[in-house]
Amino acid sequence: MAETPNLRWFEAYSTCRMCSKRADGILRGLQNESYGPHCKKHAEQRLKASQKVREGAA
Ligand SMILES: [Zn+2]
């Protein structure tokens, strides 16, 4: 297979802010603001923790 002459650089996927695993997505807030890339495990962990804060349990 002939390679294209157009390649220049590699844009790697982001890694999770809480660990060094590859992120599965971006955690977003009330106004769709970004809280950065997270893996699924840590996104769910922070979503639950945030809900606890809203409920006044933390
Ligand atoms: Zn993580």
Image: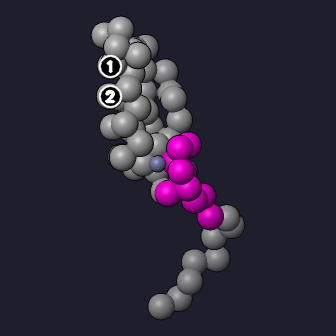
Question: Quadrant location of residue 52?
Answer: top left
**Element at badge 2?**
helix
Left or right: where 51 falls relative to 33: left
Left or right: where 58 falls relative to 6: left
Give the image location of residue 40, x and y in percent.
36, 46
Q: Any magenta on residue 17?
A: yes
- The amino acid type of the residue labelled 1 equals Gln
Determine the residue located farthest toward the right in the rendered image.
Answer: 8
Disc 2: CA contacts within 10 A as few (<14), some (14-19) or many (>=20):
few
Q: Which mark is residue 24?
A: none
Nearer to me, 6 or 41:
41
Q: Any magenta on residue 52?
A: no
Stretch of the chain drawn in magenta: 10-21
Nearer to me, 41 or 52:
52
- The amino acid type of the residue labelled 2 equals Lys
Q: Which residue is drawn at 56% across and 83% down?
A: 3
Which residue is label 1 attached to?
Answer: 51
Q: How far apart are marks 1 and 2 (CA)?
A: 5 Å
Left or right: where 58 falls relative to 19: left
How many marks overall?
2
Which residue is label 2 attached to?
Answer: 48
